Amino acid sequence: MKRITQSEFAVSSEVDRPLRRAMLNNVRLRKPSSPRYGAPRGLPDPPRTARWISQRRILSKLLLSILGAWCVRTSDAVTLETVFQTTLEKNPAIQEAKSNLEQAAGQRLVLRSVIWPIVTMAVPAGVQGGHRAGESGIKGFALARGFFTQTLFNAAVPPTLRRGDVDVLIAQQQLNVAVVQQLHQARLAFCAALYNRSLQSIREEQRQRLEENVATQKSRYEAGLTDRSALTSATVQARELDSQIESAQRAYDEARLQLAEVMGRDLGPKATLPEPEGDLKIAPVILDLDSETAAALERRADLKLARLLVRAANEDQLIIEAGYYPAAVGNVTGDYIPVTGIHRAGSTSKTQDFISSEIVERAGYTWHVIDNGKVGGATLRARATREVNELTCRKLEASVRRELLGIANNLKAIEGRERSLAAAEAAAQESARVVQQNVAQGLVSQLEYRVTQNGWLETKSGLLDAIYQHNLAIAEWDRAAGRYFQFSEDTAPNVH
């Protein structure tokens, strides 16, 4: 089994980007409040105090979340390559497939035994009594008997030997199929974890800005510059994100749990879930459909497995049809007698007794002339199985190009969507920045602020979703093109 290579899966190693962004936000929160939002001269300044307390609470929560995320990442951070290697070593499905490969190697030895000779030995011993002419008394005896049997002709021998080799090849390709499936599941779980973590970070940043707006509106309300409806609207808008953040957190934990399961980790009470490193990236790819289709037909494990099942069904049919042909067997029997005068069982004269050591060679054959449907019916069933396997294999081969074409079209659509969302995200960010400055001065309504902030959040979330979908499509392309693993050649392996 060769070492897998990481396919074109783009992840960023800049793990500290969210940390730096959060730290910049923290520094911005530490700046003193602008005096233009305070109370008139000569009066106390409660709005500034309330805003300062709110900012301190936000800062404390943010620092605690950053500290917890940093501790998790440094204690159990994993890369995609680490996930792949651990999955290969500890995944239960892959381990089971490896055991099945060893079982197939043992079964091949059993099938090969039809061509090997059968040698047995018996050593009868006992006491002989009675009287005959020229004999007297009771005496002991012992002799050695050997039997050697060799199959001379059997029409089932060649397909039986080939069937044993095909069994091992089938087990190998089943192992490869299990490897591809588990690595693909690990990759999807890794991408899902990165996506939901980034989505949660985006929504938390948005909630932080909305909390700042709540503090601003509270200051303006306490200063008598606005009515209570503005403060209520700002508070409701901030609280709307709580459920979305919790939903992203749950999805992130579920993805980490799936990642731990596919990696074969212990999920006991004290188990820690893996923390994926990096961020999702998008990189346009150029796909050659014709060459990739031809390569997929050659290297995909499920297609190789389907072809091997056709071969196995054909060998089974030949083994059953061998019942129509005669089978010839040769055997050699030898007796070694250390003493003379030992009677054969049932002998009535000395001429029927053991005279001396002897070797007897024989050959015989059997031929099942009348079938009565036993061989013919089994042959029909085996032929039907082979035909079904052939049809299934052809359907799989015909679907390869169609599957790759669908993924390629999906990738083009996602890339176009990502480009439009990237341009829209820049415009939405600028619009939200201008409206945020104006709402602090009371120049725009809370409704307009709410619309621009929601639009910016939806645009950023849509851009992240497009990047996530692009990574999933690339993973599906690698699976459909057979890029996850270097498969064994379709020859009999050297397994003893």
Image (tube, rainbow, N blue to C red):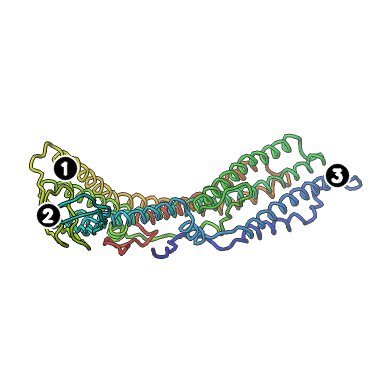
The CA distance from mark 2 to mark 3 is 132 Å
Looking at the image, is 16 positioned above or below residue 405?
A: below
Q: Indicate the amino acid at tag 2.
A: Lys
Q: Indicate the amino acid at tag 1.
A: Thr
Q: State the residue in front, 186 or 176.
A: 176
Q: Which residue is mark 3?
A: 46
For residue 354, which quarter of the picture?
bottom left
Judged by depth in the image, the label closer to the viewer, 1 or 2, is: 2
For mark 2, does the 10 Å Cα neighbourhood hold few (<14), some (14 to 19), or many (20 or more) residues? some
Q: State the residue in front, 407 or 238.
A: 407
The CA distance from mark 1 to mark 2 is 54 Å
Q: Residue at x 62, y 49 (%)?
A: 432
* In the displayed structure image, the side of residue 210 where residue 186 appears, left or right: left
Q: Earlier in the sequence, mark 2 or mark 3?
A: 3
Q: Any mark on residue 350, and which?
A: 2
Q: Earlier in the sequence, mark 1 or mark 2?
A: 2
For residue 439, which quarter of the picture?
top right
Looking at the image, is 111 positioned above or below residue 225?
A: below
For mark 3, does the 10 Å Cα neighbourhood hold few (<14), some (14 to 19), or many (20 or more) residues? some
The quadrant of the image that shows the C terminus is bottom left
Q: Any mark on residue 158, and which?
A: none
Element assignment for label 1 = helix
Q: Which residue is mark 1?
A: 379
Q: Indicate the amino acid at tag 3.
A: Pro
Expressed as whole percent of the image width and height from the top left, the position of residue 170 reads: 30, 54
- Residue contact at pointers 2 and 3, CB within 8 angstroms: no
* In the displayed structure image, the side of residue 105 where residue 372 appears, left or right: left
Q: Earlier in the sequence, mark 1 or mark 3?
A: 3
Q: State the residue in front, 125 or 359.
A: 125
The quadrant of the image that shows the N terminus is bottom left
